[in-house]
């Protein structure tokens, strides 16, 4: 072999470290990570809040927020009362806290097994109790603080109010907390050194070209490290780094692999027909300049998009087999959604994709093979490296 691919290259810069008791992962943090200090937390208190209120502020940040209306919304009145009686301490005024024997996701999970006759009810209770146990703004570890990744979307955050009379939800300046979250996740962390060390070790271990999957929320310094080390990145036409419209040919760096899709997303045809038909129309009409768009991604549509991706300035263009086969009518599956390999966030049907025809039969499709050869010639992808 002369090259290898590193999936999720960000894991070589940092990992998401999760406490053993937190099965959901929402109480995790980056590792390595620059934490938040208690002095920094003093700066997010409201003007009327005294320094002596800091213990209350830290508790409000780090303890899960459980209120009756949240319980009732998730479970309905009857099941909410059962959950409150079994798992929670009632502090009055519709405010609850978890009993010590149920104060982690793990403890709740063991108390609500799914392999019993009550699996349906236990499943509902599990979901609600897990969600409430994770309903916190920060986690504390050895006197250092880490804001939760889901903080801005949590009900704990939304319940913060601008009311000096509220001694629970009115002590924290929501705007300052928002700024601290963005600084914590988007600015203060630096993984340049760790990424360089680990990826350099891979390069020294094998005399092969390294290709990295660098999709998603990738910090700029990661791109810098990959470029400095000569590691190829992955570019999908519909997912430009940093957002924005579709990639043009000259926006693919030479040190990259251009492609139409990957194992973690829908195929080109499934994206076109089911996921984002409006975006597909913009790609075809506005970006590529063709006029015969339809809601169905025909063979010619697939062929034209494929050709545009293969014309990119990338060193390599490596296309999933499903997208190749969608360019040829008799090779297509009846439903493009069945061609996905992995569906992140879903546990059903992942990694079970199989080609619908044997390789021997595919090899006999001489017209298809001839079309691929002409496509490679037109896009100047026939050269040897």
Image (spheres, grey):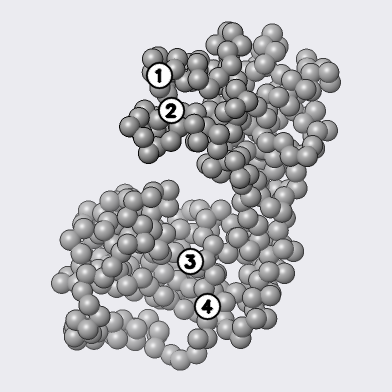
Please, what secondary structure does the residue beneath circle 2 have? helix
* Distance in Å between CA atoms under marks 3 and 1: 48 Å
Cβ–Cβ under 8 Å for marks 4 and 2: no
Residue 102 visible in image: yes
Point out the tag, 3 or 1, that comes first from the N-terminus: 1
Which label was assigned to residue 125?
2
* Distance in Å between CA atoms under marks 3 and 4: 16 Å
Is label 3 or label 1 in front?
Answer: 1
Answer with left or right where residue 262 lies relative to residue 31: left
* Distance in Å between CA atoms under marks 4 and 1: 52 Å
Cβ–Cβ under 8 Å for marks 2 and 3: no
Of residue 81 and residue 148, the one placed in the foreground of this image is 81
Which label was assigned to residue 79?
1
- According to the picture, the residue beneath numbered tag 3 turns out to be 235
Cβ–Cβ under 8 Å for marks 1 and 2: yes
Q: Residue at x 72, y 36 (%)?
A: 140
């Amino acid at each position: 072999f002369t090259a290898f691919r590193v999936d999720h290259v960000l894991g070589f810069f940092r990992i998401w470290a999760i406490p053993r008791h937190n099965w959901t992962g929402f109480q995790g943090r980056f590792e390595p990570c620059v934490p938040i200090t208690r002095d920094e937390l003093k700066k997010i208190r409201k003007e009327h809040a005294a320094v002596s209120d800091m213990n209350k502020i830290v508790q409000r940040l780090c303890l899960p927020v459980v209120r009756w209306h949240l319980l009732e919304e998730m479970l309905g009145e009857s099941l909410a009362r059962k959950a409150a009686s079994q798992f929670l301490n009632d502090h009055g005024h519709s405010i609850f806290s978890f009993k010590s024997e149920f104060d982690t996701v793990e403890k709740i999970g063991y108390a609500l097994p799914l392999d019993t006759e009550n699996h349906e009810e236990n499943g509902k209770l599990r979901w609600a109790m897990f969600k409430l146990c994770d309903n916190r703004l920060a986690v504390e570890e050895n006197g250092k603080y880490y804001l939760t990744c889901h903080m801005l979307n949590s009900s704990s955050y939304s319940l913060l109010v601008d009311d000096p009379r509220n001694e629970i939800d009115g002590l924290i300046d929501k705007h300052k907390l928002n700024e601290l979250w963005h600084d914590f996740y988007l600015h203060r962390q630096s993984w340049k050194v760790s990424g360089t060390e680990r990826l350099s070790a891979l390069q020294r271990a094998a005399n092969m070209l390294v290709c990295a999957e660098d999709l998603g929320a990738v910090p700029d310094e990661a791109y810098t490290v990959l470029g400095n080390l000569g590691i190829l990145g992955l570019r999908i036409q519909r997912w430009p780094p940093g957002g924005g419209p579709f990639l043009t040919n000259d926006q693919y760096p030479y040190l990259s692999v251009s492609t139409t899709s990957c194992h973690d997303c829908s195929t080109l045809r499934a994206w076109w027909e089911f996921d984002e038909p409006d975006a597909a129309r913009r790609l075809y009409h506005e970006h590529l300049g063709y006029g015969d768009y339809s809601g169905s991604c025909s063979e010619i549509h697939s062929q034209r998009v494929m050709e545009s991706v293969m014309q990119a300035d990338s060193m390599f263009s490596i296309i999933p087999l499903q997208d190749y086969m969608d360019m040829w009518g008799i090779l297509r599956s009846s439903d493009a959604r069945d061609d996905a390999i992995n569906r992140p966030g879903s546990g059903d049907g992942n990694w079970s994709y199989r080609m619908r025809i044997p390789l021997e039969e595919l090899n006999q499709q001489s017209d298809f093979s001839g079309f691929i050869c002409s496509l490679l010639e037109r896009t100047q992808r026939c050269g040897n490296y």
